[in-house]
Amino acid sequence: MVDFDVVPLPETDHVTAGDRAPDFTRPLVNDEFWADASLDELVDDGPVCLVFYPMDGSFPATYIWNELRDRDLDALLTVVGVSISTPYAHKRLLEERDMDFDLFSDPDNGVAETYGVAHDLDGMAGVSEARPATFLVDEDRIVQYAWVAEEWPDFPPYDDLEHEIRTLVD
């Protein structure tokens, strides 16, 4: 039995497959330090799987990152997260979840807004976070695959995402 409400999310005009992924620069956090980085810089090294997720510490964030970690997708391409959490919170998440991913810190949720995946939090005026979403971006920043949550909570179709990643990198 589910102990929370499943809530439909409003439709959104989000980035889709075939679109050019908007570039952005934000602090990129790894297990040692953080520094400003751009999506453009990341795709210079090959395709990127961009994972938007709710703030660190939420059960969807934990579930999403555990699943991605267990699938070892970062062995195939760069997998990076984007959330409203601070670099300090990202460092804790990386340590607690034993993750090798890098995470963009987007406290004003501007990147999620640009991608069309911002989600207003119920009962919190002026506070939003990213709804779960994944975008598979090639070296030219063209989105090859996009999935965006349609209800809360919702989780990426991991088998589909893994298939699309393997197709892109093979």
Image (cartoon, rainbow, N blue to C red):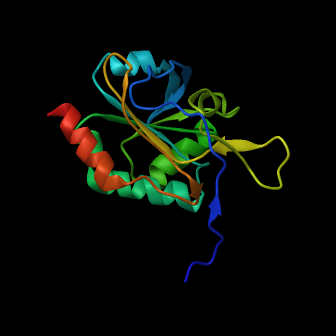
> Going by the image, does 144 lie left or right of 12?
left
List x then y, in percent, for residue 97: 44, 55
List x then y, in percent, for residue 118: 65, 39
The quadrant of the rendering that contains the N terminus is: bottom right
> Going by the image, does 14 lie left or right of 5?
left
Instruction: Tell me which residue sits at (85%, 46%) in the image.
Output: 125
List x then y, in percent, for residue 18: 39, 25
Is residue 54 positioned above or below 60 on the image? above
In the picture, residue 169 is in which quadrant? top left
Is residue 60 positioned above or below 16 on the image? below
**Most extreme residue toward the bottom, as rendered?**
1
Is residue 39 positioned above or below 12 on the image? above
| Residue 31 in sight here | no
- Near-viewer residue (135 or 150): 150
In the picture, residue 164 is in which quadrant? top left
- Near-viewer residue (55 or 119): 119
List x then y, in percent, for residue 108: 71, 32
- Near-viewer residue (12 or 60): 12
Instruction: Tell me which residue sits at (63%, 41%) in the image.
Output: 85
Instruction: Tell me which residue sits at (19%, 38%) in the image.
Output: 167
